[in-house]
Amino acid sequence: MQQNLGLHETLELHELLTFKNNCLTKSSTMGALAKDDELKRLLALDVKQSKQEIEQLLQFMPKQ
């Protein structure tokens, strides 16, 4: 999906992607360290959701 984004919008999108990638990394790492089954389940769900959200955001990134 090609969008005509302004420079400020592209920068905002880049910031969102950076944030979501950091969240994904943290949830993935903490999931491996967690002892509680419910916490592991929540972190695994967050990893799955974050991957989907990143894929959706990437659709708006301008092609280079």
Image (tube, rainbow, N blue to C red):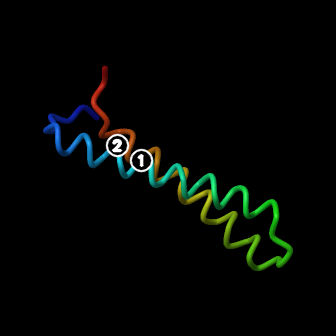
Res 62 → quadrant? top left
- Name the residue at 20% across, 45% down: 9
Q: In this view, does 63 lie to the left or right of 50?
A: left
Q: In this view, does 3 lie above or below 34?
A: above
Question: Which image quarter is the C terminus in?
Answer: top left
Q: Of the residues shown, which amino acid type is indicated by label 1? A: Leu
Q: Which residue is under mark 1?
A: 17
Determine crowd level at label 1: few under 14, some 14-19, many 20+ residues with C-alpha closer than 10 A.
some
Residue for badge 2: 14
Q: In which quarter of the image is residue 33?
A: bottom right
Frontmost residue, 53 versus 23: 23
> Is label 2 in a helix, a strand or a loop?
helix
Q: Residue at x 30, y 40 (%)?
A: 60
**Disc 1 element:** helix
- Tag 2: residue type? His
**Callout 1 touching callout 2 (CB < 8 Å):** yes
Q: Where is residue 11 in the image (x, y as percent from the top left)?
A: 26, 42
Give the Cα separation between the discs numbered 1 and 2: 5 Å
